[in-house]
Each structure stands twice: as structure tokens, then as C-alpha cells.
Image (cartoon, grey):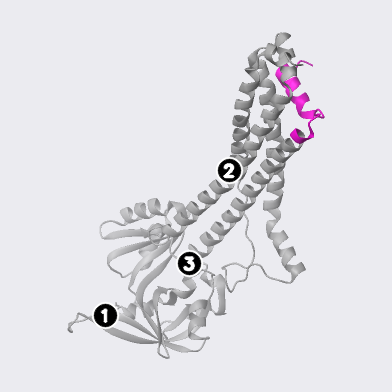
Amino acid sequence: MFRPLSIFIGTRYTRAKRRNHFISFISLTSMIGLALGVLAMIVVLSVMNGFQREMSVRVLGMVPHATLWADQPLDDWRQTAAVALKHPEVVGAAPFAELEGMLSYKGTMQPIQVHGIDPREEPKVSIVGQHMVQGSLEALRPGEFGVVIGEITARRFHLNTGDKLTLIVPEASTAPGGITPRMQRLNVVGIFKVGAELDGSLGLIHYADASALQRLQPGQVQGVRIALKDLYQSPKVAGQIAGELGAGFHAEDWTRTQGSLFSAMKMEKTMIGLLLMLIIAVAAFNIIATLIMVVSDKRADIAILRTFGATPGQIMGVFMVQGSVIGAVGTLIGGVLGVIAALNVSSLVGWIERITHRQILTSDVYFVNYLPSELQAGDVLLICGVALLLSFLATLYPAWRAASTQPAESLRYE
């Protein structure tokens, strides 16, 4: 079978049992270091993808993907919803109202954002009904001024379903100062927990009660919130629907309220990836050190090959093949182990928790009680590609030094 001289000798050097065991040890550590670097990057980035997925589902499942507002309150929100639902990207629409105020209970106060919703339509655009820990959304009835609060708010005020608290909202008036507080007694009919900041800053009431607090006519709402198949298309889709609705309508999407959170998470993933890349870079430097020592150990062999007619390019190829084989094997081992670990890290952490009887992630502190992981093929290909590229670049300088070897000088003292 035909094999180029560089590949034949390079692979033979890789397989051969060297006289210098220190070089063999350095070569092995280079391979192990590269494998560990690839393994660590795949696992860490998969876990970060998992946390980002959980945040996307929980936070963006609670806040509107997009909201359609009008300059004047909507008398018939269903007409607006019907126009929105004609768009192929829209999967749900529901009435929506928004107030900001303060919750007061036994002298303790906290700011709150209150959303007016329709309990029957809300499951089409929100996951809040799936995360109720007490009560239910169906308990929100018009005219009863019931409220569903987050778990953090309930814990801060020591509230349970059936308790009462006061909502204070500002109201424009002709009095000096222009604004007077308006108070409304609310009944706690449910408590939700999504494990995010919204548990302490969001409250839900019936949209009819929200309209009454805003002094709107019965049946009027501020706007319509919509849910999309692809939430990252929200700015484009919401703008198109607002244009179809005509003058007086405008759209607002989640990127204005929650976009900074996900930008920060993306930046964090990038920075951690760059830091972990240093592990691969260190392994690549080990490949350089290994090949330099191999070149020094094989100076006589290089000189003999040159006298037999081997060209400098073929000599370079020998050591580039040897270094590339080390890099390829290390990357392959790290990639396979990384994929296996990323797919099973959640189960592994759960097993450790059962063995040690200690919970690593608790729902009291974190928004999930397990370690999420989402393996993405793009991450694996990028990591393995960078590892192979760094391994190849690490062979260039030692290979150039080998090709620069002068046969006469090398054989003089042999």
C-alpha cells in the first residue's frame, strides 16, 4: 500500500518505543491535557446551555414575547387578537393590562408590577399555570380583586392563600403634586414559583379588575400579548403585526425588558469558553516542547534521511504528522468523553446527591433543583476544530527546526 514518506515515518515515530522515556511522558501528558481541555469545555458549555434554556423557558415563558398596544384602550381585544393570530409565527394571544405600584402588608412594603390577565386565555401565552404552588389561576374572578403572587413575595410577607394585602397605585389628580395614591384591598388566591426574579416582582389579577383600577370602561384593556413559535423573531413579527393593525398601534417585545439578561448570559458563556480554551493552549505548548525534544533526539535520523535524498519539506512533514497525531488522538478522546459526560452529567450529579445525601442545587437558592445540560453539535464541532487547529499550529516551529538541520553538523559527533 502506498504511503508518503512523511506519513510513514511520522506515524512510526508516534508508535515507536523511544529510548528517552521523558519524551514519551511529555507526549502522553500533552495528549491527556488536550483531552481534558476538550472534555471540560464540552461539559461546561453544555451546562451553561442548559441553564440558558431553563432561563429562557421560565423567564420568557412568563413575560410577553410581544405586546400590541394602542394609543387608546381596546374596546374589543379579540379583534386585535384575531389579526395577530393570522400571522404564521403567532401561536397564542390574550388580553393584557399592566400597572405598577406597591404592596403593603402589616407595615411592610415592596414594589410590584401587576399584570391584568384572562385566566382562561393566559395558558396560551404563559407557563404560569404550570408553576402554581398554591391555588390556581381560575380563582381570579372579575370583581373579586383576587391576586396571584410569586413565592418570594409570599415568603417575604409570610402570606398564604386566603390572606389579604393592600395594593397602592399612583393616580393622576388635580391635587397639589399631580399624583395621589389609590389603595385597593386584594385577596391572595394563588402563589406561583418559576425560580426567577419574577417570583418577587410580579403579581397577577383579572384584567377586568385591572381595568377598574385604571378607570377604564368595562371590557376595555390596554393591549394584547402574543406568544410566538420562535421568540427570537419577536421584534420582526411584532412590528409586522402592528403595521397590519394600522395607525395608533405599536409593539413592544421581550428584548426591551429582558434582553440585557440574556446578553449577559451569552457574554458569560463566551468568556468562560475563552478561559477554558487556555487549557487547550497549554496542551498545545506541551506538543511544541515534545516535538522540540524529539527533533533533538532524532538529529542523526534526520541527517541520514537528508543524505538519502529526503527534502526539507518531507522532514517537516514527518514531525507535523507526529504532532498532528498527538493532537487528533487527544481531541478524539476528549470529544467522545465530553459528549458522554454532557449527556449524563444531570444523572451523575443526581447519583452523587443520592450517595452523599446532600443536595448540590436546592430550589430554595437556585431556580432549578437539578443540573441542566444541553449538548449542542455546534459547540462540539467548534471546540474540536479549535483543538485540532492549535495542535497543527504547534507542530510548525519544531518541524521547521527539524527541516533546518544540517546533515554534516548532525553526523559529526555520531
Which quadrant of the figure contains the C terminus?
A: top right
The tag on residue 171 is 1
The tag on residue 378 is 2
Please state the extent of the stretch shown in magenta in the rendering: 1-23
Classify mark 3: residues with Cα within 10 Å, few (<14), some (14-19) or many (20+).
Answer: some
Relative placement, left or right, of 300 versus 405 is right
Residue at 70 percent of width and 8 percent of height: 309
Residue at 51 percent of width and 70 percent of height: 128
Viewer-nearest residue: 88 or 352:
352
**Residue type at tag 2:** Gly
* 362 over 372 or under it: above or below: below
Q: Was residue 2 drawn as part of the magenta stretch in this picture?
A: yes
Give the spatial CA distance, label 1 vs label 2: 52 Å
Residue 139 placement (x, y as % from top left): 50, 81
Which quadrant of the figure contains the N terminus?
A: top right
* 209 over 1 or under it: above or below: below
Whether residue 356 is visible here, answered yes or no, is: yes
Residue, disc 3 = 62
Mark nearer the N terminus (1 vs 3): 3
Residue 59 placement (x, y as % from top left): 49, 64
Relative placement, left or right, of 384 versus 347 is left
